[in-house]
Image: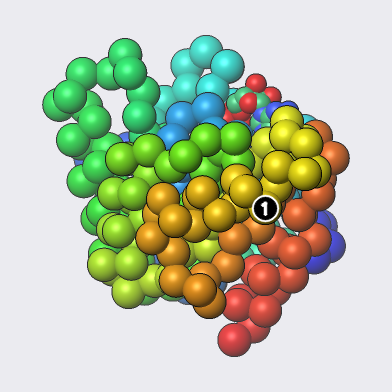
Amino acid sequence: MVIRNVELETVCGVTSTLPENTLPEFAFAGKSNVGKSSLINALMNRKALARTSSQPGKTQTINFYNINGDLYYVDLPGYGYAKVPQSEKVKWGRMIENYLHKSQMLKCVFLLVDIRHEPSANDKTMYDWVVYNGFRPVIIATKLDKIKRSQIQKQVKLIRTGLGMEKQDILIPFSAETKQGREDIWNLIDKMAAG
Ligand code: GDP
């Protein structure tokens, strides 16, 4: 995928109405700090357009990035923030669920998990929501550079089992440091946007 033009087109808060887009949408979900902003920036060929958790003032919104006027990357709110009150968590949950349920143009949900850890209960819930809404999530196992090559297969198996993935479901190990896995993700998006 050649990135010619990127624009943060729509930002939706809890009370906003979701846009009725006519271009294919590709959504990214995962717990806070999993590396979602880093992945989205890598897929946009930008250093810091999607805000990372370490940046102050990061609010919980659904952000729609228009890519080349061809498709959208949809950055869903990161879940699992320990400091946030339960009432807020419930609101974000509803916001994500509402998006998954309502979007007419959503082609695929990429669910990010850290390759070093077993998926959490929140990861499993997110996975189940995606499946419940009729999508097969594509799992991105982030921070690939943080483990040894010899550990990859074991961690992949742990994640597949933890989430209850089906055999045919796709898991792509990815590193924002080395950009390993990026080409595979771009190819998948190209294929699904066309089909
Ligand atoms: P987000 O909260 O899911 O958007 O996560 P960020 O993209 O802000 O990443 C959280 C932290 O993990 C930051 O310090 C990133 O630099 C780091 N990080 C993200 N992806 C990778 C990766 O692939 N490799 C390494 N080594 N660090 C990463």
Vertical order, 69 against 125 (above or below): below
For the N terminus, give its image quadrant.
bottom right
* Ligand number 1: quarter of image: top right
Amino acid type of the residue tagged 1 in the rendering? Gln
Image coordinates of residue 38 in percent, x first then y, are 67, 36
Image quarter of residue 39: top right
Q: How is the image coloured?
A: rainbow
Image coordinates of residue 72 in percent, x first then y, are 57, 60
Q: Is residue 78 left or right of residue 140?
A: left
**Mark 1 crowd level (few <14, some 14–19, many ≥20, 10 Å Cα):** few
Where does label 1 land, which residue?
Answer: 153
Q: Say which of 99 and 175 sits in front.
A: 175
Residue drawn at (28%, 18%) of the image: 84
In the rendered image, is residue 181 in sight? yes
Q: State the SS at label 1.
A: helix
Name of the residue lying farthest toward the left: 87
Residue drawn at (76%, 54%) of the image: 181
Q: Say which of 152 and 176 sits in front.
A: 152
Q: Is residue 66 left or right of residue 118?
A: right
Q: Say which of 51 and 188 sits in front.
A: 188
